[in-house]
Image (cartoon, grey):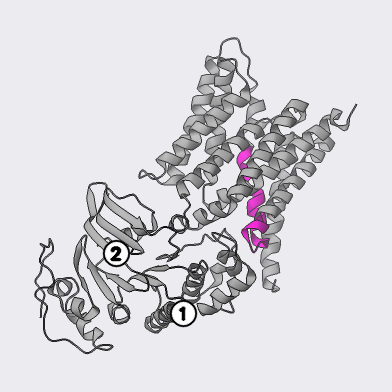
Amino acid sequence: MSLVEITKLTVRHGHNTVLHNVNFKIDAGEIVTIVGPNGSGKSTLIRAIIGALRPNAGSVARKMGLRIGYVPQKLQIDPTLPMNVRRFLDLPTRVPNREAREALEEAGAGDLASRQMADLSGGQFQRVLLARALLNKPQLLILDEATQGLDQPGSAAFYQRVAQVREHLGCAVLMVSHELHVVMAASDRVICLNGHICCEGEPEHVASAPEYRALFGTGTGGALALYRHQHSHSHDDACEHDHDHPHEAAE
Amino acid sequence: MSFLDDFLIRATLAGIGVALAAAPLGCFVVWRRMAYFGDATAHAAILGVALALAFDSAILVGVLGVSLAMAITVSSLSNKGYAMDTLLGVLAHSALAIGLVAVSFLQGVRVDLMAYLFGDILAVGRADLAIIWGGAVVVVILLVWRWQALLTATLNPDLAYAAGFDPKREQMVLTLALAVVVAVAIKVVGVLLIGALLLIPAATARPFSGTPERMALMAAGLGAISAMLGLQMSYQYDTPAGPSVVVVAAVFFAIAAIVAPILRRSGH
């Protein structure tokens, strides 16, 4: 079966329906990216997958004994909490020194073990978070806007690192991102989310779908071309269902 | 005859027992920015004293019950749109006021309120000592057992969920431990100073700690030493016992605050 299979998921925050009737699954070894504007429910979907919130309707089925490596959107470590990198890797379960060292090297943070988390730069911090997520040999690596606050080269380097890790561990990767051009080029499948799933498919397919362009405009199509050649034909059959957002995509 | 016959030794052991449990718990109070949580729970304890006297039950039971109720109230209200500090401020002061009003209704019972506000460590008997150490051991075992989960939940609730812990349950564990510490400490340092014993050693240990464990151990040591020195001071100079313990802890904090930046500058 799939690693995670979500059926007809609906999540409400108060009276506000954040996710409506979302179906989603991810298979072993797949790289899937979720894109969508602010408030589209991306993080909510991730939180449902890791079990941090209870759906109002629908179901979230995880494969038995699924090992998830989770890199949160942001991690604010209170300055009153002393925490060096090595100790941080011991959460939630203690790991032998050798494994900790290997994970740090895998994530490109090999020389940081004795540093305080609070003293790390943004890029170093994200690599340490990645290293921690790798420790339980995850079958599914989840990155929730993991490069927020990193500059362009920093986030490109981070995603390259993720791609290497995937190659090495063979885990599935589920990413949320705004940085469409960087992430989409590396993805097997892209899901465009705005409270419901607008469209999904291969990166080129989604980038040229009218639903996607309605949300992001056409500018990102050009950015995608940095990595993939532009597809000029349009997929009018990308979605059949109704959308509650405007579709005046300016071409 | 045993060495427990000496009231000063009983008092010192009581102080150490409370400090050993309060300090590591206080670290979580500091890390989670719930400094007022200890106060709120402690202030509610006065209401517990009043209720226990009214219903003629053991003080410990009344205090434990009300502290728990308070802690659960705070936990469940904390994500309902009030800022934590506001909520705790409201509850802490209300609980103290309600407790004081409730005490005034007790006819014919003369309550030495000062004893509960500031503690009466020199009057600690053998039974009290057993309760204090029993409570302290329970709290320390609870903290050691849930340590990793508590730390993960303190860092980030979603990390805890991803690891299969329920951060709400861990919050409950802390709350429970806090109620136990307040209940057993009320006799030693009193309601008004419990917060001090939770916070001051933890805050003092922070600049010298690279890991959470080190901070907790150091805080426990500082708390125990403060209890010992404070009681000596109280005995020598005839100062009130509970406040003397807190004064010593505060002096340690002041020294740490002066020394830490100097150490950091010289590269440690």
Q: Nearer the viewer, residue A55 or B134?
A: A55
Q: Secondary structure at mark 1?
A: helix
Residue drawn 54% across the image and 46% down it:
B35
Residue type, mark 2 in image? Lys
Q: Residue B103 at what x, y percent from top left?
A: 55, 19
Would you say A101 lies left or right of A123 here? right
Q: State which region is magenta.
A: B194-215
Q: What secondary structure is marked by label 2?
A: strand
At label 2, counting other C-alpha atoms closer than 10 Å, the crowd grade (few under 14, some 14-19, many 20 or more) is some
Please give left or right for residue B121 compared with residue A63 in the image.
Answer: right
Q: Position of residue A61 (x, y in %)?
A: 34, 56
Image quadrant in which you'd find residue A190: bottom left
Q: What type is the residue that disc 1 sits on?
A: His
| Residue A146 visible within the image | yes
Name which quarter of the figure residue B39 lies in: top right
Tell me if residue B212 is in the magenta stretch: yes
Left/right of residue A210 with respect to residue B35 in the rendered view: left
Q: What residue lies at 49% left-to-right and 70% top-to-bottom?
A: A134
Residue at mark 2 to residue at mark 1: CA–CA distance: 23 Å
Q: Is residue B58 above or below residue A219?
A: above
Q: Position of residue A185 (x, y in %)?
A: 29, 82
In the picture as drawn, the residue positioned furthest to the front comes out as: A1
Confirm whether residue B92 shows in the render.
no
Residue closer to the observer: B226 or A102: A102
List the residue tagged with mark 2: A25
> Considering the image in quadrants, where does the N terminus of chain A appear?
bottom left
Residue underneath mark 1: A168
Residue toward you, A31 or A87: A31
**Magenta stretch containing residue A4, yes or no?**
no
Question: What predominant SS class does the magenta segment belong to?
Answer: helix
